[in-house]
Image (cartoon, helix red, strand yellow):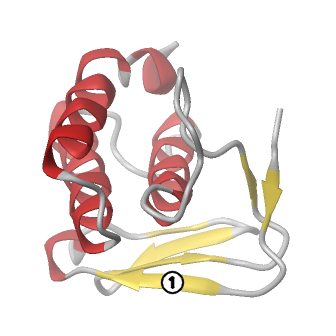
Amino acid sequence: EHKYEMIEEFYFIDPNIAKYKCDHDFFSIGNGCITARKGYAWDGCSGPTIDDDTNMRASLFHDIWYQAMREKLLPRNWRTRRAGDKLFLKILKEDGMPWYRRTAYFYSVRGVGALFVYF
Protein backbone atom coordinates (compact mmCIF):
# COMPACT_ATOMS: atom_id res chain seq x y z
CA GLU A 1 0.00 0.00 0.00
CA HIS A 2 1.42 3.38 -1.01
CA LYS A 3 0.55 6.63 0.74
CA TYR A 4 2.72 9.05 -1.24
CA GLU A 5 3.61 9.69 -4.87
CA MET A 6 6.28 11.94 -6.35
CA ILE A 7 4.89 14.79 -8.43
CA GLU A 8 8.34 15.76 -9.70
CA GLU A 9 11.87 14.36 -9.78
CA PHE A 10 13.78 14.52 -6.51
CA TYR A 11 17.34 13.43 -5.72
CA PHE A 12 19.95 13.07 -3.00
CA ILE A 13 23.71 13.07 -3.50
CA ASP A 14 26.07 11.06 -1.31
CA PRO A 15 29.58 10.08 -2.41
CA ASN A 16 29.38 6.99 -0.16
CA ILE A 17 26.99 5.35 -2.63
CA ALA A 18 29.04 6.18 -5.75
CA LYS A 19 29.82 2.53 -6.53
CA TYR A 20 26.14 1.56 -6.74
CA LYS A 21 24.31 1.81 -10.05
CA CYS A 22 20.88 0.81 -11.29
CA ASP A 23 18.06 2.14 -13.39
CA HIS A 24 14.32 1.63 -13.04
CA ASP A 25 11.32 3.33 -14.62
CA PHE A 26 10.68 5.24 -11.37
CA PHE A 27 14.15 5.66 -9.85
CA SER A 28 17.84 5.51 -10.54
CA ILE A 29 21.05 5.18 -8.56
CA GLY A 30 24.39 6.17 -10.03
CA ASN A 31 27.39 8.47 -9.73
CA GLY A 32 26.67 9.01 -6.03
CA CYS A 33 23.12 10.17 -6.73
CA ILE A 34 19.82 8.49 -5.92
CA THR A 35 16.87 9.87 -7.88
CA ALA A 36 13.14 9.42 -7.36
CA ARG A 37 11.34 10.06 -10.62
CA LYS A 38 7.89 11.55 -11.07
CA GLY A 39 5.30 8.89 -10.26
CA TYR A 40 7.40 6.94 -7.75
CA ALA A 41 5.12 5.79 -4.91
CA TRP A 42 6.10 4.72 -1.40
CA ASP A 43 4.52 4.23 2.00
CA GLY A 44 6.61 6.45 4.28
CA CYS A 45 8.28 4.95 7.33
CA SER A 46 7.14 1.47 8.29
CA GLY A 47 6.04 0.38 11.71
CA PRO A 48 4.55 2.39 14.55
CA THR A 49 5.85 5.75 13.32
CA ILE A 50 4.53 9.16 12.38
CA ASP A 51 5.51 10.55 8.99
CA ASP A 52 6.92 14.06 9.39
CA ASP A 53 9.51 16.44 7.96
CA THR A 54 12.33 14.60 9.74
CA ASN A 55 11.72 11.22 8.13
CA MET A 56 9.96 11.65 4.77
CA ARG A 57 13.07 12.08 2.60
CA ALA A 58 14.83 9.26 4.43
CA SER A 59 11.87 6.92 3.97
CA LEU A 60 11.66 7.80 0.26
CA PHE A 61 15.29 7.03 -0.52
CA HIS A 62 15.44 4.02 1.80
CA ASP A 63 12.37 2.52 0.11
CA ILE A 64 14.01 3.04 -3.28
CA TRP A 65 17.20 1.35 -2.05
CA TYR A 66 15.38 -1.67 -0.64
CA GLN A 67 13.18 -1.96 -3.74
CA ALA A 68 16.31 -1.96 -5.91
CA MET A 69 17.69 -4.81 -3.78
CA ARG A 70 14.40 -6.76 -3.85
CA GLU A 71 14.27 -6.45 -7.64
CA LYS A 72 17.94 -7.50 -7.84
CA LEU A 73 18.97 -4.22 -9.44
CA LEU A 74 21.50 -3.82 -6.61
CA PRO A 75 23.41 -6.69 -4.97
CA ARG A 76 21.37 -8.42 -2.28
CA ASN A 77 24.07 -8.67 0.36
CA TRP A 78 24.82 -7.24 3.79
CA ARG A 79 27.19 -4.54 2.46
CA THR A 80 24.61 -3.10 0.10
CA ARG A 81 21.91 -3.25 2.75
CA ARG A 82 24.18 -1.54 5.27
CA ALA A 83 24.96 1.22 2.73
CA GLY A 84 21.23 1.87 2.31
CA ASP A 85 20.66 1.89 6.06
CA LYS A 86 23.54 4.34 6.57
CA LEU A 87 22.07 6.57 3.86
CA PHE A 88 18.76 6.45 5.78
CA LEU A 89 20.52 7.50 9.01
CA LYS A 90 22.42 10.30 7.27
CA ILE A 91 19.23 11.79 5.82
CA LEU A 92 17.39 11.53 9.15
CA LYS A 93 20.22 13.51 10.75
CA GLU A 94 20.29 16.11 7.96
CA ASP A 95 16.54 16.60 8.29
CA GLY A 96 16.76 17.29 12.01
CA MET A 97 15.50 14.13 13.66
CA PRO A 98 16.72 14.03 17.29
CA TRP A 99 19.58 11.59 17.89
CA TYR A 100 17.58 9.27 20.19
CA ARG A 101 14.75 8.92 17.66
CA ARG A 102 17.01 8.44 14.62
CA THR A 103 19.05 5.87 16.56
CA ALA A 104 15.86 3.92 17.26
CA TYR A 105 14.83 4.15 13.59
CA PHE A 106 18.28 3.07 12.42
CA TYR A 107 18.45 0.03 14.67
CA SER A 108 14.89 -0.88 13.68
CA VAL A 109 15.79 -1.00 9.99
CA ARG A 110 19.03 -2.84 10.79
CA GLY A 111 17.11 -5.37 12.87
CA VAL A 112 14.16 -6.15 10.61
CA GLY A 113 15.19 -4.67 7.26
CA ALA A 114 16.31 -8.03 5.90
CA LEU A 115 12.67 -9.15 5.97
CA PHE A 116 11.89 -6.44 3.41
CA VAL A 117 14.78 -7.34 1.12
CA TYR A 118 15.06 -11.11 1.04
CA PHE A 119 11.50 -12.32 1.71
Residue 33 horizontal/vertical position (percent): 38, 83
The residue located at (33%, 44%) in the rendering is 75
Residue 64 horizontal/vertical position (percent): 54, 55
Q: In this view, does 58 lie above or below 81?
A: below
Q: Say which residue label 1 marks.
A: 11
Residue 77 horizontal/vertical position (percent): 25, 33
Is residue 81 rendered to the left or right of residue 36? left
The residue located at (62%, 46%) in the rendering is 44
SS class, disc 1? strand
The residue located at (54%, 40%) in the rendering is 45
Q: Is residue 30 above or below residue 88?
A: below
Neighbor class of circle 1 (other Cα within 10 Å; few <14, some 14-19, many 20+) is: some
Query: Residue 56 lies in what quarter of the image?
Result: bottom right
Q: Is residue 20 above or below residue 110?
A: below
**71 or 116: nearer the eye?**
116
Residue flagged by tag 1: what amino acid is it? Answer: Tyr
Q: Which quadrant is the N terminus positioned in?
A: top right
Is residue 77 rendered to the left or right of residue 76? left
Q: In this view, does 67 lie above or below 94?
A: above
Is residue 88 rendered to the left or right of residue 16? right
**31 or 37: nearer the eye?**
37
Residue 24 horizontal/vertical position (percent): 66, 65
The residue located at (44%, 14%) in the rendering is 115
